[in-house]
Amino acid sequence: MRSRAQGAQEGSARPEISREFIAVHKRRRIMDAIAELSAEQGYDATKIGDIVRRAGVARKTLYDNFDGKEEVFLSAFDAAYEEVTRRVEGACAAAEGDWDERLAAGLAALLGYVAERPAMARMCLIEALSATPAAKERYEDALGAFVGLTGRIVPRDERLPETIDETVVGGVAWIVYQKVRRGEAARAEELLPELTEFMTAPYLGAAAADRTRI
Amino acid sequence: MEVERLPRGRHGLSREYVARNQRERVLAALAECLYERGFAATTISMISRRAGVSKGDFYKQFESKDACFLQAYDDAVAQFHEGTVAACEGEKEWAAGVLAALAALLDLLASRPPQARLVLVEGLRVGKGVYDRYQEALLAFVSHLRAGAPAPAGAVSPPAATDEAVVGGIASLLSRRVAAGEVEQLPDFLPQVAEFALAPYLGAAEARRIISER
């Protein structure tokens, strides 16, 4: 997405880059359109004709930018994932205080994104699971990346199960999934207090046990 | 499949026995085909051949591959669920029941790799409303976990979403491990998933004590 930033900065001043800005903007409209449509009617039922109509672009524009429907979907997923990761990592890094504050800030950023982009969230958390094998793989990789991110933030404790980060993140993903599935993505931030508590508890519990033992 | 089903309602007619037997074989064959090559590459001819029935017999039982798939999915879920619930019925203590149930579930999954993969991995890739079934199956486990769980008391008070997050987290871990081809090693994860399940209610120390005594 380097080109988008460039276009945004210089687009108004120079007409030939403004064309690039428009192209990037169209790409984004196409990706937003597939998110909305697959959230509304499912991936399978969404046709190229629906996407170009919703995005307000010519069919040729879509094919100039993407190989076809699957590439639109995967590109939209990748863009959303990039955006979420950027926000979550940024929030974790910016949070003051201990690891639990950083974890809570990251979780808040994630839920904030879900609330702000319900259709994109639905596409990534629900439609991606069954759209195509490549989409499901993207989802699994993203989940794995969040497991890794969590593992880098929480304190190490060898008494905890080796798989604790995986189960904790899987549990959070499941709760968010259900919220989105109920059509309540816009209210995802309601989940923040209980999910923060659920996520931090195993690691806090270990810390508390340490103190009791000493 | 090794499980012999009880007659459903009508008895005595050997033609019905044959039909039922064929149905079981077709469902088992579908799970095996999916296990080996995935849903898309599995054809009705392959399923019929493996089950040792004619294509005509297949269509007497199921109107399509999808219908056969959904039935196989529901059957596999029902078997895992029944086996898990039966295992904890003899236990008086809630924690011992959860432990017994998890042990039974992991053993069952490991003893039936095609069905485990059908429920936790391949089925979910197919879509077609399978996520509704998956969600329903998980919610059934949630209500069992919740029944008899110790009431929040003192320092240990799990957040509201705990039951669902615990079940969702375990399902996510199992699904990832089955996808990674580790279905036969699932019983090794018992201490880890049991601690993840019990610690939110009992605290980590008590959870570990109960698990180590098993």
Image: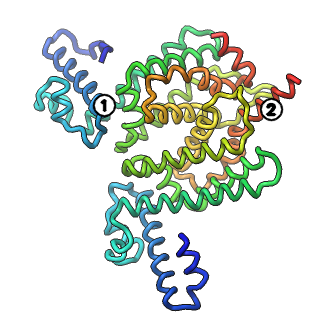
Q: Amino acid at mark 1?
A: Gln
Count residues near mark 1 (Cα–Cα under 10 Å), then give few for <14, some for 14-19, many for 20+.
some
Give the secondary structure at mark 1: helix
Specify the subunit that label 2 lies on.
Answer: A
Asked if residue B103 is positioned above or below residue B121 in the image, the reply reads above
Residue B152 pos. (x, y %): 74, 27
List x then y, in percent, for residue A176. 58, 46
**Residue at the image position 46 percent from the left and 51 percent from the top:** A138
Quarter of the image containing the N terminus of chain B?
A: top left
For disc 2, the neighbor class at 10 Å (few under 14, some 14 to 19, many from 20) is few
| Residue topped by disc 2 | A207
Q: CA distance from mark 2 to mark 1?
A: 47 Å
> Is A194 rendered above or below residue A107?
above
Relative to A2, say whether A153 is above or below: above
Image spot of residue B85 (x, y percent): 50, 18
Between residue A185 and residue B209, name the one nearer to us.
B209
B165 displayed left or right of A48: right
Residue B39 image-quadrant placement: top left
Instruction: State whether discs 2 and 1 lie on one chain.
Output: no
Q: Amino acid at mark 2?
A: Ala
Q: Is residue A175 left or right of residue B152?
A: left
Tag 2 secondary structure: helix
* Marks 2, 1: nearer the viewer: 2
State left or right for residue B47 relative to residue B84.
left
Q: Which residue is mark 1?
A: B71
- Quadrant in the rendering for residue A198: top right
In this rendered view, identify the residue nearer to me: A103 or B167.
Answer: A103
Q: Residue furthest right?
A: A214
Residue A14 tag number: none
Residue at 67%, 55% in the rendered image: A89
